[in-house]
C-alpha cells in the first residue's frame, strides 16, 4: 500500500502535473497560472492561424476572376489588327510605288501657265475642301511609242460630302485661249505642253480648281478592260453600224458584251451621227458612258482580282497624286456602292456654236465662257451665285 502511494506520487511528479492549471510543462516544472510569454505565443499563433484560414476560405469560396482572360483575348486581337493594318499599309505602298510619277507636275510647273483669258469671267478659281477634282486624260500613242494628243479630257469630281462622283467631258475642239500658244483647239494644249498645259488651260478658262490628273494610254486601257472581263454596253444603231464596218464585229442595237478592243473603239468613234448630233458631242458622251460602266463593274469584282489588275496595270498609269490622296481614293473605292454618278458636258447645250472654221486650225467650237463657267460651278459645287466670287 505504502509503495503504491509512493509510486503514485512519483508518477505524478514525473508526469509534470501542475496544481495551478492542471498541466505541467514538458520538463515537469510548474508554471504560474498567467504566463505573459505563453499568452503572447498563443495570440501570435491564433492570429496566424485564423488570418491564414480566413484568406484561404475567401479564396476557396469565390470563383476566379475572368478579367485576365478578357484582357488576354483583346490584347491578342489588337496585335492581329495591328499586324493586318501594317500589312495593308505596306501593300498599299507597294501598289502606289508602281505608279508612274515621272511627269513631276506640281504647283510650280502649273504656276507658269496661270492667266485670265480675255473671254473668261474675272472670277476667283473655285475650290472646296469636300470636292476633289482629277483630270482624266486618254492619250494617243505616236508611231515611236511616245504620247500623242489627248483624245479624252474628262474631269472626275469626287464630292465626299454628298457621296457623288461627277464626270465632266470637255470637247476637244473647244476653241480656247491656251497659255503661251494663243487660241486653239483644247487638244492642242497636250501636244504643245503636255499635262500641265492642258490642266491649266481648263482651269484658266472654266475657273474651277484642277491640279490633279491621271493619264492612261488607250492601248493599256483596253487591256485592263479585258482583265475585268469586258463590259456590257447599251449601243445605238449608228454606233453598231460604225463598229461593225470598222472592227468586223456583228453587233446589234441594244446591250452588247464588248471586249477591251471593241470598248475602246466604241469610246472613240468619230463619225456616228445619232441622237447626240455633233460627232464630238456623241463621242464624249460614249466616253462618259464607258467610265460609268467601269465604275459599276468595279463594284462587283472580287477584291483579290481587283488588286491583281491594279498591280499589273498601275505602271502604265501616270499621275501626280500623292500617297495621302491615293489613300483617300482607296477609301472612296471601298465605299463606291454608296456613291451616285452624275454627268455633264462642256460646253453645255445651247451655249456654243460648232459651225466656225479657223484657217490653219480647222473646224472649232466657239462657246460662251461665262455661261459655261456658271453651269460648271453649279454642277460641281452647287453654287447658285452667278457672280462667281
Image: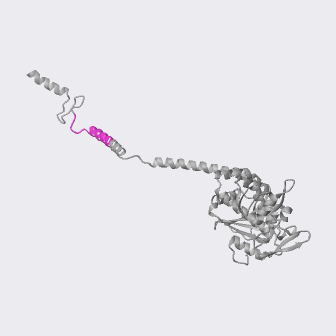
Residue 380 picture location, percent across and down: 70, 70
Left or right of 337, for residue 251: right
Left or right of 13, for residue 218: right
Instruction: Say above or below: 303 vs 243.
Output: above
- The residue furthest right is 359
Instruction: Say above or below: 62 vs 346.
Output: above
Residue 152 picture location, percent across and down: 79, 63
User: Which picture quadrant has residue 331?
Assistant: bottom right
Q: Is residue 295 visible?
A: yes
Instruction: Say above or below: 162 vs 74.
Output: below
86 and 218: which one is in front?
Answer: 218
Q: Is residue 317 visible?
A: no
Residue 327 picture location, percent across and down: 67, 57
Q: Report the magenta residues as a range.
A: 31-50
Left or right of 37, for residue 341: right
Q: Residue at x 72, y 72 (%)?
A: 377
- The residue furthest left is 1
The total of numbered circles placed on residues is: 0
Instruction: Say above or below: 340 vs 63.
Output: below
305 and 63: which one is in front?
Answer: 305
- Membership of 48 in magenta stretch: yes
102 and 159: which one is in front?
Answer: 159
Residue 131 picture location, percent across and down: 68, 66
The quarter in which the C terminus is drawn is: bottom right
Q: Residue at x 21, y 38 (%)?
A: 33
The quarter in which the N terminus is drawn is: top left
Amino acid at each position: 500500500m505504502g509503495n503504491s502511494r509512493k509510486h503514485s506520487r512519483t508518477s505524478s511528479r514525473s508526469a509534470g502535473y501542475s496544481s495551478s492549471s492542471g498541466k505541467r510543462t514538458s520538463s515537469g516544472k510548474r508554471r504560474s497560472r498567467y504566463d505573459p510569454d505563453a499568452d503572447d505565443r498563443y495570440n501570435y499563433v491564433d492570429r496566424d492561424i485564423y488570418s491564414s484560414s480566413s484568406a484561404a476560405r475567401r479564396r476557396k469560396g469565390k470563383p476566379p476572376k475572368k478579367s485576365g482572360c478578357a484582357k488576354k483575348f483583346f490584347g491578342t486581337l489588337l496585335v492581329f489588327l495591328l499586324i493586318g493594318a501594317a500589312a495593308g499599309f505596306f501593300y498599299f505602298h507597294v501598289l502606289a510605288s508602281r505608279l508612274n510619277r515621272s511627269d513631276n507636275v506640281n504647283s510650280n510647273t502649273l504656276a507658269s501657265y496661270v492667266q485670265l483669258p480675255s473671254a473668261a469671267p474675272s472670277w476667283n478659281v473655285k475650290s472646296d475642301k469636300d470636292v476633289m477634282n482629277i483630270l482624266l486624260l486618254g492619250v494617243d500613242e505616236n508611231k515611236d511609242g511616245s504620247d500623242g494628243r489627248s483624245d479624252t479630257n474628262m474631269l472626275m469630281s469626287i464630292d465626299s460630302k454628298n457621296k457623288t462622283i461627277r464626270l465632266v467631258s470637255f470637247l476637244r475642239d473647244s476653241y480656247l485661249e491656251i497659255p503661251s500658244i494663243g487660241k486653239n483647239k483644247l487638244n492642242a494644249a497636250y501636244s504643245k505642253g503636255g499635262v500641265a498645259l492642258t490642266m491649266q488651260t481648263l482651269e484658266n478658262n472654266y475657273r474651277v480648281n484642277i491640279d490633279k490628273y491621271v493619264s492612261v494610254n488607250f492601248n493599256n486601257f483596253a487591256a485592263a478592260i479585258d482583265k475585268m472581263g469586258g463590259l456590257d454596253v447599251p449601243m445605238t444603231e449608228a454606233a453598231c453600224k460604225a463598229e461593225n464596218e470598222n472592227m468586223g464585229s456583228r453587233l446589234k442595237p441594244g446591250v452588247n458584251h464588248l471586249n477591251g478592243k471593241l470598248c475602246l473603239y466604241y469610246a472613240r468613234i468619230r463619225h456616228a451621227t445619232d441622237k447626240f448630233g455633233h460627232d464630238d458631242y456623241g463621242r464624249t458622251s460614249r466616253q462618259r458612258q464607258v467610265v460609268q460602266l467601269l465604275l459599276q463593274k468595279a463594284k462587283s469584282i472580287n477584291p483579290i482580282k481587283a488588286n491583281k489588275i491594279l498591280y499589273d496595270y498601275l505602271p502604265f498609269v501616270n499621275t501626280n497624286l500623292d500617297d495621302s490622296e491615293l489613300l483617300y481614293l482607296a477609301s472612296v473605292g471601298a465605299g463606291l456602292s454608296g456613291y451616285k454618278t452624275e454627268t455633264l458636258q462642256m460646253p453645255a447645250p445651247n451655249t456654243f456654236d460648232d459651225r466656225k472654221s479657223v484657217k490653219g486650225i480647222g473646224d472649232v467650237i466657239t462657246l460662251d465662257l461665262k455661261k459655261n463657267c456658271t453651269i460648271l460651278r453649279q454642277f460641281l459645287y452647287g453654287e447658285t451665285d452667278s457672280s462667281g466670287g
